[in-house]
Image (tube, helix red, strand yellow):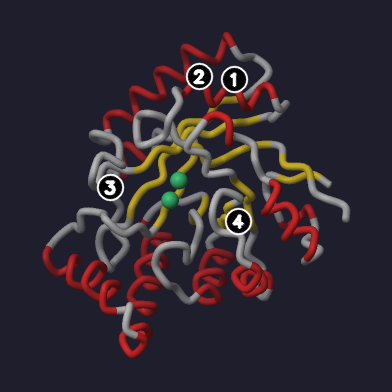
Amino acid sequence: MTMLKIRSDLHTHTTASHGKGSMEDNVRAAAALGLQKIAITDHGPAHLFGVGIANEKVLLQQKAKARQLAPLWPQIEILVGVEANIISPDGRLDVSESILEQLDIVLIGLHPRVLPASAGSAKALVWQNWLAGFPRFQPAAIETNTAALIRALERYRVDVVAHPGLHLRIDTLALAAAAAKRNVALELSAGHHVEKAYLERVLQTPAKLVISSDAHRPEDVGSFLPALKLAAELKIPALRILNASS
Ligand SMILES: [Zn+2]
Ligand SMILES: [Zn+2]
């Protein structure tokens, strides 16, 4: 089985959200593996229970920190981004546009346990997804979740959709078609979402992929193996994966 080589890890967390290491710990780990780029993408501030960053200004502090680190780590490029949360069914994110514009990479994700933008958003995103535990309510939740993601792609400059379908059910085919149109990549998360059916659906569209670790500990930075195995099994060409080389 020939496996692709991944040049950069575009999804990692630090202690600014609920990761275990510092920015420099992640950079050190990535540099030790010979990666060309490492992205720091902590959870947006609407993530509850201490999972998210304290507020969106933290992202600018991280940008400043990355600028300090850059001369110490000339062998690797440090990107600062965010894993922003969708907080309304019409695709609002929990980071303002003026901050997003200053970041190097923007990931968006649908997560449970996120503070919605309003009571109406709570009903659509939280209550519907809770009901989706019952099969007859699943189609409505899938429709709402997918539409929210697609609206976010239309509203913001997004680079990657993180682990589509991991926590909340979606229509992968519809999302992938919309992502392809807007040149947004879908993630194949080596950390926790290596699902063949998902990948097969994405491959039915022209959407691009990125393989990321979603590392929450420095020792997991650059760990791509389960995703690489699945990509090899499905014979995905390197060209299809933005951060791969053959
Ligand atoms: Zn996530
Ligand atoms: Zn993540």
Upstream in sequence: badge 4 or badge 2: 2
Q: Are marks 3 and 1 in contact (CB under 8 Å)?
A: no
Quadrant containing the N terminus in the rendered view: bottom right
Upstream in sequence: badge 3 or badge 2: 2
Is residue 72 shown above or below 98? above
Q: What residue did someone put label 2 on?
A: 24
Q: What residue did someone put label 4 on?
A: 188
Q: Nearer the viewer, residue 150 or 125?
A: 125
Q: Residue 47: x, y in percent?
A: 28, 47
Q: Amino acid at mark 4?
A: Leu
Q: Residues within 10 Å of mark 4 (few under 14, many from 20)?
A: many
Q: Amino acid at mark 3?
A: His
- Label 3 – label 2 distance at C-alpha: 23 Å
Q: Residue 196: x, y in percent?
A: 66, 69
Which residue sits at x=35%, y=35%?
17
SS for callout 1: helix
Q: Residues within 10 Å of mark 1 (few under 14, many from 20)?
A: some
Which residue sits at x=41%, y=24%?
63
Q: Given the current orientation, which residue lies at the most extreme left position?
A: 119
Is residue 183 shown above or below 89? above
Which residue sits at x=56%, y=49%?
191
Which residue sits at x=32%, y=62%?
91
Q: Are marks 1 and 2 in contact (CB under 8 Å)?
A: yes
Q: What residue did someone put label 1 on?
A: 28
Q: Amino acid at mark 1?
A: Arg
Q: Residues within 10 Å of mark 2 (few under 14, many from 20)?
A: some
- Label 3 – label 4 distance at C-alpha: 22 Å
Q: What residue did someone put label 3 on?
A: 47
Displayed quadrant of residue 229: bottom right
- Label 1 – label 2 distance at C-alpha: 6 Å
